[in-house]
Amino acid sequence: MSSEQPAAARVHGGPDQHGVPRYDFSTNSNACGPCPTALAAVQQADPGPYPDASYSALRRQLAEFHGVEPQRVLLAASASEFIFRISAVAAQSGQGVWLPPHSYGDYAQAASAHRLALAAGPAEAQLLWACEPSSPLGAAQAGLAELVDAQTAKAMLVLDCAYEPLRLQAAPSLSYTQLQSVWQLWTPNKALGLTGVRAAYAIAPLAAQHSVAALEQLCPSWPVGAHGVAMLQAWTSAGVQAWLAASLASLRDWKARQIALCQALGWVYLPSDANFFCARPLLPQGMSLQQALAGLRAQGIKLRDTASFGLPGHVRVSVQPPAAQDALHNASQQLLKDMK
């Protein structure tokens, strides 16, 4: 009998054993989506032929969009796939990994899968993770600029840019020059409201040819299918970027309304720069957070428990349209009444 323990279940937002939530506050997908132009491109994609195995045209488009050389662009099946792949590269050196205090669970999952030790501090790690706006807080990552400036030549610092396109306020912590010294991981499906389309890409730092080669060697053939290619191509278009900019204006208005609604319920709001935020709900006496979330889920409302992010007693709440906000408000009030 094997002595190894079974892998812990991964915690994610979105659909669960009960199906797709009617009001889903648990994922950070753009609630204004899906983007019509990007959705049409995905629907019209031809899945008959293989994509170009080198993704030459797509790499050029993404490189031009970001103002970098095509050889610095790497395609990935998803952000999670790239997280596991770059962790495998780090494991080849036998070094450790450093994580922010609160971070996406796949960083630690990938480290564990590749037997990478968790380093006590950034200086002891080969692979360092950063995310801004951060998850679950949606805020600036404290000390990020200093972390970038202090990284060693052998370290790989990955900046998860999943929520940068959904930034609603404040400026990024890193300058253009600092960005050129880190790995940038981009997942446009969240910003486009198309999280079911799995495709991502990374931009390598300058002078990272050896790591690029190692990552390409570990990459399976055709990591991105026809629908993912179509979404990433649409992402770079002026029309899609204009739609995204307009959606941010709506999200700002919705966010202000949603914060006020949550505070009216007695929830403690934690400041955020993105299209989501964390809050500590006011719970009826004798009711646990898990019971409250189960009660809301029974009414078609799903929130994300942040215990898996190292933030117990809180929920991460994505910004949703007013109708969904009202449903959350009414259901939360009903829970309070039922417990009296």
Image: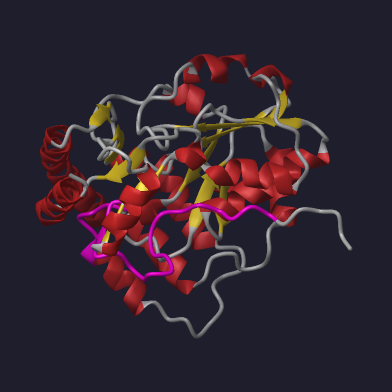
Question: What quarter of the picture does the N terminus occupy?
Answer: bottom right
Decide which of 330, 334 is in the foreground and name it: 334
Apparent side of residue 14 relative to residue 238 in the rendered image (left or right): right
Q: How is the image coloured?
A: secondary structure
Decide which of 276, 154 is in the foreground and name it: 276
Compared with 321, 119 (above or below) is above
Decide which of 184, 322 is in the foreground and name it: 322
Query: In the image, residue 237 lies at what x, y percent?
Result: 30, 55
Q: Residue furthest front?
A: 340
Q: Is residue 28 visible?
A: no
Q: How many marks?
A: 0
Q: What segment is highlighted magenta in the picture?
A: 7-36
Query: Magenta region, mostly helix, strand or loop?
Result: loop
Q: Residue furthest right?
A: 1
Query: In the image, residue 172 lies at what x, y percent?
Result: 36, 26
Query: In the image, residue 100 lies at what x, y percent?
Result: 54, 28
Compared with 196, 281 (above or below) is above
* Magenta span contains residue 17: yes
Apparent side of residue 333 relative to residue 317 in the rendered image (left or right): left
Residue at screen point 63% across, 41% down: 108
Residue at screen point 38% across, 56% down: 189
Query: In the image, residue 28 lies at what x, y percent?
Result: 33, 49
